Each structure stands twice: as structure tokens, then as C-alpha cells.
Amino acid sequence: MATATKHISKNGKVSYHIRAYNGYDYKGKQIAHRMTWTPKPNMSEKAIQKELEKQKLLFEEKVKSNNLFDSNTTFEEYSKKWIENNRPPQLAPKTYERYKALLKDINTAIGHIKLVNLQSHHLQEFYNNLRESGVNRRGNYASSINLKEYIKKNKIVKTELAKKAGIAVTPLNKACKAEAHVSIQTAESIAKVLKQPVNKLFNIFHSNSGFADKTVLNYHRLIGSIMRQATRDRIIPYNIADRDYIKAPKVKRKEAIFLNDSQIELILSKLKYEDIKWRTALELLIYSGMRRGELFGLEWKDIDFENNLIHIYRTSQYIASMGIITKDTKNITSERTIKLPNIAFELLTEYRKWWFEMRSNMGDMWQNKITVTFADGKQEVVENDRLFIKDDSTPIHPDSLTAWTEKFIKKHNLPKFSPHSLRHTNASLLIANGVNIPTVSKRLGHANVSTTTKIYSHAIQAADEKAADILAEKLNPLNKNNR
């Protein structure tokens, strides 16, 4: 039987939140469906109760018949069902988390509007607002004043603090550094556990910027996907986010950031003196062009030392709500085999020796079996075979490489780069040295060659100019002889 809860807003407006259940999710929990009914003005209490019982019965019938949506359905009501229906593995976990975050802003702006009444000008007003100064709250951050000293002085165990604050140890370590930026939410969580005012431990900074054009486009694409499904469900006759009704936000194409030959040579020369784990990780990115997540998904059985081949089957990611997860590669073509030069496998051989020595030295502390979480939330106990591991022998947090890279750059005063920019560097070097685009695309695991040509247009143009120069040089002697 459907239930109703009375709600009185700050301005005294009365509404009823009606809830009905139908079926169970994969965890065995009842699936709840909700709607809000607002009585008409001047209705008597008796009339309200009579109509409320009618609304409860009607809603329960809708839920049981799965006919939940009609011409009165708001964008927020429909979007909540849409995101619920697209939980992982329907969507990739990272995509799902990002969509949930985007929907908070979308529903604040247009969630109250009925799907049938939503028009393109509503979307345009929302996009314009996203670009306004101060709207981008993600530009807000906190930096430590004296968190490290406070933890040390009070003899606080970081692992326990992180657990109570509901965060991982990595962001806690980052929060302890005065020059590092963490989210205000992270700072507030830490301060709450320590029972201290947040401004006593952190400086809080607020952004004055609006969202970038690319982010505005992401909002638009999500709205378009939801409205597209609403047309399939026959709730609306057409999709007002379609290009026939509104122009998608324009985004200036940015060239991929990559390093040149001399910069890579400098980085490789400095890496020789660094910890073998981090050195191996960065050099593998340079020589392979694989994604950071693919690197941390590697297991020893994926490495063919005899033929200098690496097989890429999985990726490792961190999702705030799930922790470190293991999932399939980005697309079918991302599952691939790539050949690396001898120098890369010489380093891998050295690293494998260090890895086995570490396992031997840890003795009983080494975890031969680890629990792996998959994209759909399911878990499995498997053999511990990951190449890159933490000090406790469990899979490494992907962000830890990015954090180490920042320290490495600062230590040696190197040009700024990220682990992902090494992927771009690998592709650019291959193109510059005459490797054909389909081969580069295949090594990178792109779904289409067109993706490669779009991302690396500058490198392709530079290679084309080089080809023209070579052709002129080769033909010049012939021209002279023909004069």
C-alpha cells in the first residue's frame, strides 16, 4: 500500500510526498518510487484526505503497471528514474558518478519544469548561467594551515582519521601539505572528525569563474540523452536538446599537450635515479602510450617477456563511492596487444626482480589473495598478481602516480606534464617519425582512426610538412640534372 507524508514548506505551502514500492534491486532491497501531490488552494481537510487516498491508489497502480510517467512528469522526476536505470554496469562507474553530479545542477535549474513544457530557451538560459562568474563551485578549494602539525601534536593515526572522515588516506596526506589543494568538502570532513573549526585548519578559497565551454557541453549532452529516452518512452513528441531545436555549446578544439624529444630525454635521465616502482610506471607510459588506468590494471600474466609484448585486458580506477575498482577496457579496441622496445623490457625485468624480492621480504604480511571490486559492484577474491602495488601489497591508487609525478617535476625543475600527457607524447613521437595513423590508433586503443586524427592534428600536420621537405630534398638533385 502506498504511504503519504505531509510536508510544509517555509512559506506554509502544504504538499504530500507519496511513496510506493514495486520489486527488489540486486541487493534484495525494495525499490521505492516517489511522487509529490499538492492540494488545490481552499480545499477542506476532509476533501484533501479523500483526494490524497485517491492519489495514493492511482500512484500505486502506476507503479505496479510500470506506467510511472505522463504529461505531468517533471524533468527531475524522469531524470532520477533515468539515472537509476543506468547504474553500472549500464554506465561506466566514473561516468555514472559524473552524471549524478551534473544532474544536481541541472535539476536545480530545470528540474521543476514538466518534460512536455521544457523548451530550448530554458536550456539556453541554463547554459548562459553556467558560464557566469562564481558559478563554478568546483574551482573552490581548501589548503592546509597547520593540519600536519595538529595531527602530529595530538598523535592522531592517519588511517583512523581517514576512515572516520570517510575519505582515503591519499587525499588526507594531500590535505596535510600547505601547497596542495583539496575540496572544501574534504576539509570540512576532516575538521568535523577533529572537532575543530574548518578555518582553524584550512584556508578556504572560492572561485570567481564560470564553467568552461567543454563542461557546458557535457551538461547539454546529458540533458540530450535523457530527453532522447523520454521520446522513446512516448512521454514527449521530440527532443528539444536536439540540434534541430538548439545549437550545442561550442567548444574550441584544444591540441593535446605533449613533450618534445629533448624534454623526454631529460625526464628519462632524471628517472634513472628514482624509486624503481615509479620509474617503471612512468617509463612504461612513455614507451607504450597506454592509459594510466590500463597501466595499473596490468598483471604479470599479461607480460610476454619472450616476445616483448604487453596484453591490455583491464583497467583500474578509483570511484569515490566504491574505492578502487577493476573494469573492462574503455572499448573493444582498447583490449589490445602492443610491442615495446628492448629497453622497456630490460626495466620490466629489473622491476619484476624487485617485486618478487618485496614479496619475499614481506613474508606472512604479503597478501597472496586480494578482493577485487568490479564495475557492477560485485567482488571476487583473486590471486595477487598486479604489477603496481602499495606497501601493503594491495592494488595501488591510480591518483598516487599523478601525485608522485608532481613531486618529481618540482624536485628536478622539469617542464609540467601529467601521466596522461605521456600518452599524447608517445603518439606524437610515433607520428613525427613516420608511423602510419592506423598503427598509432591501434596501439592507443582508439575506437576509430578519426579519433586519432582529431586529437593529433598538429602532429600530423607537422609530419606532413616534414614529408614535403624530404620529398623536395630527394627530388632536388633530379631537378638540377634536368636543367
Image (cartoon, helix red, strand yellow):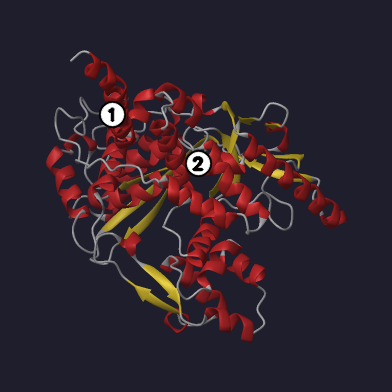
Between 411 and 152, which is closer to the camera in this rendering?
Answer: 411
Which numbered disc, 2 or 1, marks the residue that appears first in the sequence? 2
Q: Which mark is residue 93?
A: 2
Residue 153's image quarter? bottom right
Does dot 2 land on a helix, a strand or a loop? helix
Between 216 and 46, which is closer to the camera in this rendering?
Answer: 216
The C terminus: image quadrant: top left
Does dot 1 land on a helix, a strand or a loop? helix
Residue pictured at 15% horizontal, 27% vertical = 244
**Residue 380 in sight here:** yes
Residue 92 versus residue 134 in the image, above or below:
above
Residue 204's image quarter? bottom left
Residue pictured at 23% horizontal, 19% vertical = 480
**Residue 298 in sight here:** no
Q: Position of residue 120 (x, y in %)?
A: 14, 38
Other residues around mark 2 within 10 Å, as few (<14) / some (14–19) / many (≥20): many
Q: Position of residue 143 (x, y in %)?
A: 43, 74
Q: Amino acid at mark 2?
A: Pro
What residue does disc 1 label? 469
Between 34 and 369, which is closer to the camera in this rendering?
Answer: 369
Mark 2 to mark 1: distance in Å? 48 Å
Q: Is residue 368 left or right of residue 204?
A: right
Q: Is residue 292 left or right of residue 199?
A: right
Residue 294 versus residue 404 in the image, above or below:
above
Q: Position of residue 394 (x, y in %)?
A: 71, 51
Residue 435 versus residue 164 in the image, above or below:
above
Q: Amino acid at mark 1?
A: Asp
Between 233 and 331, which is closer to the camera in this rendering?
Answer: 331
Q: Position of residue 337 (x, y in %)?
A: 59, 26
